[in-house]
Image (spheres, rainbow, N blue to C red):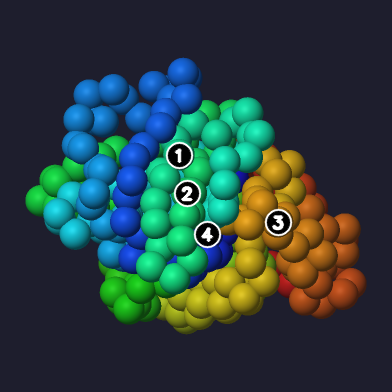
Amino acid sequence: MPELPEVETIRQQLVTSLPLKIEGVEFSRVAESIIKKSDRKIDLAGKKILQIRRVGKWLEMVLDSDERILSHLGMSGSWRLWQKVQNEKHAHVLIHGIHLEDGPVIWAYVDPRRFGKMYFMSGEKAEQFKSKLGIDVSSIEFTVDYVWQTLRKYPARAIKAFLLDQKYFAGVGNYIACEICAHARIRPTRRVKSLTLDEVKKIHAATGIVIAGQLPKGGLTFQGGYRDAFGEKGQGLANLVVFHQKVCGLCHRGKIKKIVLAQRGTFYCPNCQK
Ligand SMILES: [Zn+2]
């Protein structure tokens, strides 16, 4: 599933074809499961996409009409940058556009499993929508104090399961949550109420380390088969320290244990995570 680094990689790649003047939009026959027909009433032709922002795992395309396209990639979605239409059977939304320098460009939303979501809405509605998305863990609002106050709300939750809650930790997914716990040297199963302020500081710092470590590598591809906007796979799992690893990448001694926590495969090092 695309997490913050994967979604941010796609965002940075799409930005290279901005501003994009939209000539028309095409939908596949089964696009309804991603974008509802009633949502397509905004006529995009002739308008320009000026900017793309990211909040957590959501992409927000900002139009010159102040309308927005909000896109969540679900399990297997991605936006591809095409020069011309390609034979891709899982392309469900095609935005045909013109870039001032590059000429015709197509932004294709490709999603084999169709768990993605897309909304076309006014700027005002988009702001309301985003206000419910929670704090993005790579934003400046994500502070030690924020993490401390947030964790106090649900003292009985296991830390790793809590980190997956998009209402509080927008952008974190399963592999990022496992890696944060590893870098913070905290077992994923620890109840939040048992964490000291010092450990919460470590979780905060570890979040920065994990995100910063993944971003320049262009995202991660495993199982779900993430592809970036150029159709390239991301890196493999080799650069991670616990997620799907055999030996811990931090202490190089601990044998990684896999457990199931809140229905998600969870990896940790019994040697360095307390
Ligand atoms: Zn270890």
Residue assigned mark 1: 94
Q: Under tag 3, what secondary structure?
A: loop
Q: Is mark 3 within 8 Å of ligand 1?
A: no
First in sequence: mark 3 or mark 4? 4
Q: In the rendered image, which quarter contains the C terminus?
A: bottom right
Location of residue 180 in the rendering, given as x and y in whole percent from the top left corner = 58, 67
Look at discs 3 and 1 and give the one toward the viewer.
Answer: 1
Residue assigned mark 2: 107
Q: Under tag 4, what secondary structure?
A: helix
Under mark 1, the amino acid is: Leu
Q: Is mark 1 within 8 Å of ligand 1?
A: no
Under mark 4, the amino acid is: Ile
First in sequence: mark 1 or mark 4? 4
Which residue is situated farthest in the left direction here? 124
Residue assigned mark 3: 232
First in sequence: mark 3 or mark 1? 1
The answer to whether residue 173 of the structure is visible from this angle is no
- Residue in the foreground of this view, choosing between 247 and 172: 172
Look at discs 1 and 4 and give the one toward the viewer.
Answer: 1
Residue assigned mark 4: 10
